[in-house]
Amino acid sequence: MKLDVLFSPVQTDELFFTGKTTVVIDVLRASSTIITALANGAKEVVPVGTIEFAVKVSGGIFGGQTLLGGERNAKKIEGFALGNSPSEYTKEVVSGRTIVFYSTNGSRAIVKAKYSANLFVCSFNNLSALAKHLKKLGEDIIILCSANNNFLSLEDSVCAGMLVHELIAENNMINLTDGSKSALTLFKSFGKNILKLLSETDHGVLLINNGFESDLKACAEFNSTEVIPFYSGNVLKVLK
Ligand code: MLT
C-alpha cells in the first residue's frame, strides 16, 4: 500500500486520478461544510467547478429544487441560499435536500479528481472514521490538498499528515512517498492544537478578518462525526 500527498491540485491534471483512490481535503472550509451538510441529513452534495455551472445545474437538471451553497472570496455568492459556514448547514435547512456547491478551492479539487475509482472527502471532523475505512479498503491512496488558490495550505497539509499518521499506525507495510513523509512532518510540528493552527494560517486569518472566527471552531472539531462523503455519479453521498 502506497500513500502519497499532493499539496496542491496544480501539481497534476484530471487524468492523473483515473482509477485511483483519492481523498480530498479542504479543512477551511469546503470539506468541513460538506461533511456537516451530509451529517445533518442532506440527500447529496453536487460539487461544481464554476458558479455559472452551479446555477445551470441547479435550475436545469434538478428543476430549481436544490439549494445553492458556497462562496467566492470567502463570502456567500449573490443569489445563493447558503454560504460556506458549516453552521448554516443545519438539519432544519438541509435535511433531505440536494445542495449544489461551489467553492474557490474545495469543490474544484473534488471535480478535478472526479475520474478516481474511489473519491472521499476528509476534514478533521471525520478523519478517524475515514482512516478506518481506508485501512479496510487496502488500496494505494492519493491525498489531495485543495490548497489556497494553488498555493500550499498549512491546514490541509497538516490534516493530510494526520491522516497519514493514522494510516501507518500498526502497519509498517505502508510505502510513504516524499509527499506523505513531508505531510507527516508538518503534522508532527503543527498538529498538536488544531484550533490554534487554524487561527494562524493564511486562510484562517482571512476568515477571522471577515467575521468567520466561529467557523474555525467547527472546522477544528476532531472526529465529531463518522460520516464519509463518497463521490459517485457526480454527487457526494454518505458512504454506507
Ligand atoms: C474554498 O473552497 O476555497 C474554501 O472553502 C474557501 C472558504 O473558506 O470559504
Image: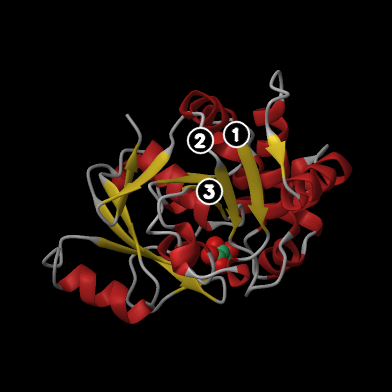
List the single residue furthest toward the left.
Answer: 63
- Closer-to-camera residue (13/224): 13
**Label 3 vs label 2, nearer the camera:** 2
Instruction: Determine which residue is flagged by label 2.
Output: 139
Q: Earlier in the sequence, mark 3 or mark 2?
A: 3
Identify which amino acid the numbered label 1 is placed on: Met
Q: Is 204 rendered above or below residue 239?
A: below
Q: Residue at x 44, y 66 (%)?
A: 15
Instruction: Determine which residue is flagged by label 3.
Output: 32
Q: Earlier in the sequence, mark 2 or mark 1?
A: 1
Q: Residue at x 50, y 35 (%)?
A: 139
Q: Quadrant of residue 193?
A: top right
Identify which amino acid the numbered label 3 is placed on: Ser
Which secondary structure lies at badge 3?
Answer: helix
Mark 2 → mark 1, Cα distance in angstroms = 6 Å
Q: Is residue 170 left or right of residue 125?
A: right
Identify which amino acid the numbered label 2 is placed on: Glu
Q: How far from the left and from the top, in percent, is residue 196?
A: 81, 47
Give residue 1's mark: 1
Mark 3 → mark 1, Cα distance in angstroms = 27 Å
Q: Is the residue marked 2 within 8 Å of ligand 1, measured from its CB?
A: no
Q: Residue at x 58, y 61 (%)?
A: 146
Q: Earlier in the sequence, mark 3 or mark 1?
A: 1
Q: Is residue 28 left or right of residue 155?
A: left
Tell whether label 1 touches label 2 (CB within 8 Å): yes
